[in-house]
Image (cartoon, rainbow, N blue to C red):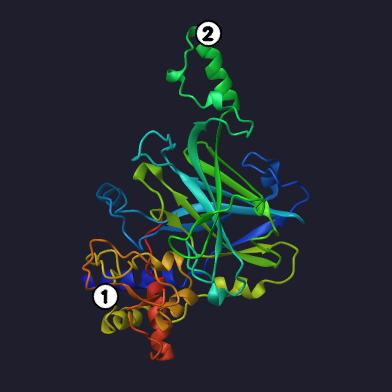
């Protein structure tokens, strides 16, 4: 019976690893998308696709409570749609969340629900940036929206008198009621930020006119609806091809989610309906993984990977290298292959502070991070395919 159960589990893992990533179709519309929100009628003609977002477990936070709250996280299914016209493209995400968490700004241990949509200028599926933060020489543009309490003075008109805490005014009774009403009228609960990032700890907010976007977030019937619309072309991005790579992430404030503690997708191909080109990207991101999962697992053990990485979720925690327990959920086969043959191409900085100082993830050479991981470019093609297939199988169960 134990052998049969193991066989069934292995078969399930193999099937999971062979699943192609979902593709999203951006429907062409005539409507103005510059202020498209989740309540806009434009979504009536959109085509929603299921995209799974997996728990990011590359680096564990130094937060005991957060780690405990997220220890049993599963993959989260989101419904994603896109529409575009000649000037703009807009995305809508819908995902289940039984608790509505709002950032209040008064406590340091209260976090908000939110989402992000990520773009890249790269057009080659083999050299897409590291998911989440981009990588050196491969920048990403990240649109972030999170749920926040209404705040004051959002209109740029200098209404500083309404930034004062109501308890610090000299107003009482009817005057205070009028003050509260005025604050509610000019306040905003729109938290929208756009960043450019070229690797961990390089996120920089875009505050000049080079970015033009519009995002909204709303809660209804046990789940969130989030939208982002942006220009197809600006100083940061030229989304001119027939298909573009896009990635998605969501945060759960109930579980103290923030920064890297989130669920995220791998790069997803978004095909612009009626526009030629981009077929190679769609095929590459939807390609089934080659290789034998069982042989790949054996090769990973034989080549010492488990000596530094926590490979599967049931393995003991290892602080000597990034965790791989969900790497198959948000990494493309091309990225995994590159990581094996060129381990210094993308180096995650800031290894866990609790790790032993004699076991560093990387060294520095003239300011460039050099991975201490072994270069596995000497592996034969079959072994490489098997290892990549196994790594692609490492992903949590989906809710």
Residue drawn at x 46%, y 20% is 166
Q: Secondary structure at mark 1?
A: helix
Q: Is residue 292 visible?
A: no
Query: Where is 4 relative to 175, above or below?
Result: below
Residue drawn at x 26%, y 61% is 353
The quadrant in which the N terminus is found is bottom left
Q: CA distance from mark 1 to mark 2?
A: 68 Å
Which of the two marks, 1 or 2, is nearer to us in this view? Answer: 2
Residue drawn at x 64%, y 42% is 37
Q: Nearer the viewer, residue 49 or 125?
A: 125
In screen coordinates, is 33 left or right of 135?
Answer: right
Q: Which residue is mark 1?
A: 306
Q: Residues within 10 Å of mark 2 (few under 14, many from 20)?
A: few
In screen coordinates, is 215 left or right of 231?
Answer: left
Percent across and percent down for residue 284 are 57, 75
Query: Where is 69 relative to 268, above or below?
Result: above
Q: Nearer the viewer, residue 254 or 176?
A: 176
Percent across and percent down for residue 72 are 30, 54
Q: Nearer the viewer, residue 136 or 273?
A: 136
Q: Is residue 162 visible?
A: yes
Q: Which residue is mark 2?
A: 174
Q: Secondary structure at mark 2?
A: helix
Q: Residues within 10 Å of mark 1 (few under 14, many from 20)?
A: some
Q: Nearer the viewer, residue 150 or 381?
A: 150
* Quadrant in the rendering for residue 28: bottom right
* Quadrant in the rendering for residue 15: bottom left
Percent across and percent down for residue 346 are 44, 73
């Amino acid at each position: 019976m134990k052998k049969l159960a193991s066989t069934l589990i292995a078969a399930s893992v193999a099937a999971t690893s062979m699943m192609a990533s979902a593709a999203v179709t951006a429907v062409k519309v005539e409507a103005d998308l510059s202020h498209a929100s989740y309540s806009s009628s434009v979504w009536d003609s959109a085509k929603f696709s299921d995209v799974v977002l997996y728990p990011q477990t590359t680096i564990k936070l130094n937060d005991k409570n957060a780690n405990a709250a997220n220890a049993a996280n599963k993959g989260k299914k989101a419904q994603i749609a896109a529409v575009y016209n000649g000037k703009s493209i807009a995305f809508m995400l819908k995902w289940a969340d039984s608790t509505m968490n709002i950032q209040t700004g008064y406590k340091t241990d209260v976090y908000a629900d939110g989402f992000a949509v990520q773009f890249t200028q790269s057009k080659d599926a083999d050299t897409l940036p590291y998911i989440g933060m981009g990588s050196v020489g491969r920048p990403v543009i990240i649109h972030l929206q999170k749920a926040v309490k209404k705040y004051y003075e959002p209109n740029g008109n200098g209404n500083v008198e309404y930034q004062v805490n109501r308890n610090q005014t000299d107003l009482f009774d009817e005057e205070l009621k009028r003050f509260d009403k005025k604050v509610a009228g000019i306040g905003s609960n729109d938290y929208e930020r756009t960043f450019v990032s070229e690797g961990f700890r390089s996120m920089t907010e875009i505050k000049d006119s080079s970015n033009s976007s519009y995002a909204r977030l709303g809660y209804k019937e046990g789940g969130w609806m989030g939208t982002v619309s942006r220009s197809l072309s600006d100083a940061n991005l030229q989304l001119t091809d027939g298909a573009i790579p896009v990635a998605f992430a969501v945060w759960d404030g109930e579980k103290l989610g923030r920064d890297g503690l989130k669920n995220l997708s791998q790069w997803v191909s978004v095909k612009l309906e009626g526009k030629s080109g981009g077929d190679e990207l769609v095929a590459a991101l939807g390609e089934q993984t080659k290789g034998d999962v069982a042989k790949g697992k054996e090769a990973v053990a034989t080549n010492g990977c488990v000596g530094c990485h926590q490979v599967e979720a049931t393995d003991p925690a290892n602080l000597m290298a990034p965790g791989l327990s969900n790497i198959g959920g948000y990494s493309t086969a091309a990225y995994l292959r590159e990581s094996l043959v060129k381990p210094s191409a993308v180096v995650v900085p800031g290894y866990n502070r609790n790790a032993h100082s004699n076991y560093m993830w990387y060294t520095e050479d003239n300011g460039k991070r050099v991975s201490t991981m072994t270069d596995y470019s000497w592996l034969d093609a079959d072994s490489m395919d098997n290892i990549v297939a196994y790594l692609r199988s490492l992903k949590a169960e989906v809710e």
